[in-house]
Amino acid sequence: MYELVQVTNNTYYIQSPAKIGLYRLSDTDVCLIDSGSDKEAGRKIRQILEQNDWTLKAIYTTHSNADHIGGNKYLQDHTGCQIFAPGIEQAFSSYTILEPSFLYGGYPMKDLRHKFLLAQESEAELLSKISLPEGFEMIPLPGHFFDMVGYRTPDNVVFLADCLSSRKTLDKYGLPFIYDVKSYIETLAKVSSMEARLFVPSHAEACESIAELAQYNIMKTQEASELIVSICNEAISFENILQKLFYHYNLTMDMVQYALVGSTVRSYLSYLKDCGRLSTEFSDNLLLWKRI
């Protein structure tokens, strides 16, 4: 783990739970794409930098989930590097209590205030085209999170962040985290037609062609949509929908899973209501969902 993998003369990635991109700006200066999950990830990245006599100039954030910005503060404190994040992700990177608050839908209890969902705060600047290294392309990838982006390096390597999951993850868990289902499907369709020298998803193997995996993610998203619609054959509350989904996918409920999967299911329900496939009604002071 935390092995440095060279892809081209200047583009590398660090093998970790959420892959970290590294691009050589010069013989001595580098930038990162994301920073890993926590202080320990930051420490291991710093060791790689020191072993290669590299100076970290900037971190370019794909999105503000804690497993992608957890090393920001450590690296910024020890190197003085700049951190750039796109759109709303900049606010979430600077005020990290926003992530568990958003997922839970209120002030998060202690069970949700830990490094898995709550990274240390760092000083992030708003990403713009001007702040990108020469030859870099920022690729909007909305759906998984608010304003998530990917990056294409000058040597045509594309870092895809969390816009798709591996087959293994999808087959095991069924419901990867999604904020906006409509945008998620649209992003996958866009990604499936992309070409690059190499694609580096954060949570799947690097590959030369991404189309097949993108289409598999679309299929699994559509399957989840159909499953939720079928669960709503009779008027049913959110909590009961969530329970049935946990049973269907053989998931085990805990507070983190309740927040992550619960948020995703709410997003599916919003998507299906907006598509005209589900309706809502209030009965005995309960919000119920019903197939149309």
Image: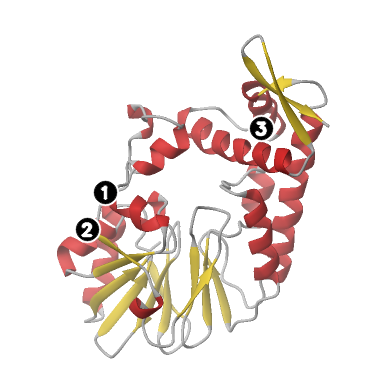
Residue drawn at point x = 61 percent, y = 74 percent: 207
Q: Nearer the viewer, residue 277 or 252?
A: 277
Tell me the residue that label 2 is attached to.
74
Residue 97 position in % (x across, y down): 32, 41
Type of the residue with mark 2: Tyr
Residues at discs 3 and 2 in contact (Cβ within 8 Å): no
Tell me the residue that label 3 is attached to.
250
**Which picture quadrant has residue 61?**
bottom left
Type of the residue with mark 3: Asn
Residues at discs 1 and 3 in contact (Cβ within 8 Å): no
Horizontally, residue 264 falls left or right of residue 126, namely right
Question: Is label 1 or label 2 in front?
Answer: 1
What is the tally of numbered marks visible in this picture?
A: 3
Q: Nearer the viewer, residue 134 or 246?
A: 134
Q: Quadrant of the C terminus?
A: top right
Q: Secondary structure at mark 2?
A: helix
Question: Is label 3 or label 2 in front?
Answer: 2
Disc 1/disc 3 C-alpha distance (Å): 32 Å
Horizontally, residue 90 falls left or right of residue 288, namely left
Disc 3/disc 2 C-alpha distance (Å): 37 Å
| Residue 120, label in figure | 1
Among the two numbered marks 1 and 2 on one chain, the one whose residue lies closer to the N terminus: 2
Q: Quadrant of the N terminus?
A: bottom left
Q: Nearer the viewer, residue 116 or 139?
A: 139
